[in-house]
Image: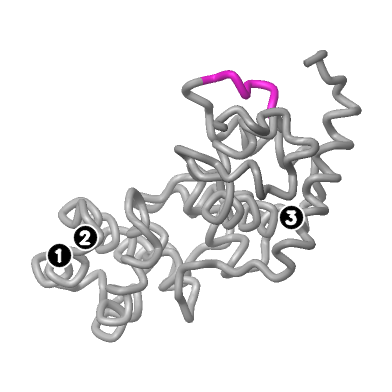
Amino acid sequence: MPEESKRKRLERMHAEYEVLRELIPSPQCALHFKTPFQLLVATVLSAQTTDVRVNGVTPALFARYGTPELLSRANPEQVEDIIHPVGFYHTKAAHIIELSSQISTDFNGEVPQSMEELTTLSGVGRKTANVVLGNAFGIPGFPVDTHVMRLTGRLRWRTDWRSTHPDPVKIEKEITACFAPEEWTNLSHRLILFGRSTCHARKPDCADCPLNDTCPSAGMWA
């Protein structure tokens, strides 16, 4: 297909996003939480596992260690026993205990509300920080996970769509430049939910995809 101009690509992106807005009118964070601290811990635990699995262990974890102070003083082996089903439990237990200690010591027991401060915490990168900013504090954030990387590539919303090792930070910067900040959190949610329901990693459902008329990759997996 002929190369698409930047203006045409931007117009198509917004048209396709309007379809996703209609398809998914009220996206919600899939992780269950009651406080910013709970969301932070749950997001750290969600690395390389499913949200369902994380939601299965966090009720017991937070019933026992519901605050940074309590979790910072937890016995690592007891934490590992609770979070064992999410995988990588040795590393994840160490991260959530250490970040709890950091929050207690460095931030007076309150989860910080900036990218710069959140990413000083153990096990917290930009994706986790963006999840917390957008969903716990209502501060614009655009988490880039594997679904977001896949869909922005297949839809050719990003210029490096051919890359086999896309840079999440570059994707975040490029995509957020195209949308209003108040849309960033829900934009990520909608891409993730659409990736789970339709644009699957191995075999996307192009035949029933509402974007198949404009998606540059439509039908490639038929």
State left or right for residue 165 relative to residue 216. Answer: left
Q: Amino acid at mark 2?
A: Ala
Residue positioned 66% across, 49% down in the render: 208
State left or right for residue 13 relative to residue 79. Answer: right
Residue positioned 57% across, 32% down in the render: 222
**Residue neighbourhood size for the residue with mark 3, other residues' Cα within 10 Å, grouped as few (<14), some (14–19), many (≥20):** some
N-terminal label among 2 and 3? 3
Q: How many marks?
A: 3
Q: Amino acid at mark 3?
A: Leu
Secondary structure state at the residue bearing disc 3: helix
State left or right for residue 192 relative to residue 55. Answer: right
N-terminal label among 1 and 2? 1
Q: Amino acid at mark 1?
A: Glu
Residue 93, label in figure: 2
Secondary structure state at the residue bearing disc 2: helix
The image quarter in which residue 176 lies? top right
The image quarter in which residue 104 lies? bottom left
Residue 80, label in figure: 1
Kindly check if marks 1 and 2 are in contact, taking CB atoms under 8 A apart as contact.
Answer: yes
What residue sits right under mark 3 in the picture? 20
Q: Which residues are magenta?
A: 158-163
The image quarter in which residue 23 lies? bottom right
Residue positioned 70% across, 64% down in the render: 24
Q: Quadrant of the N terminus?
A: top right
Q: Indicate whether 29 appears above or below 124.
A: below
Q: Indicate whether 84 appears above or below 16.
A: below
The x, y position of residue 184, in whole percent, is 70, 52
Q: Residue at the far left: name it.
A: 77
Of badges 2 and 3, nearer the viewer stands 3
Report if residue 78 lies within the magenta region: no
Q: Residue at the far top: name it.
A: 2
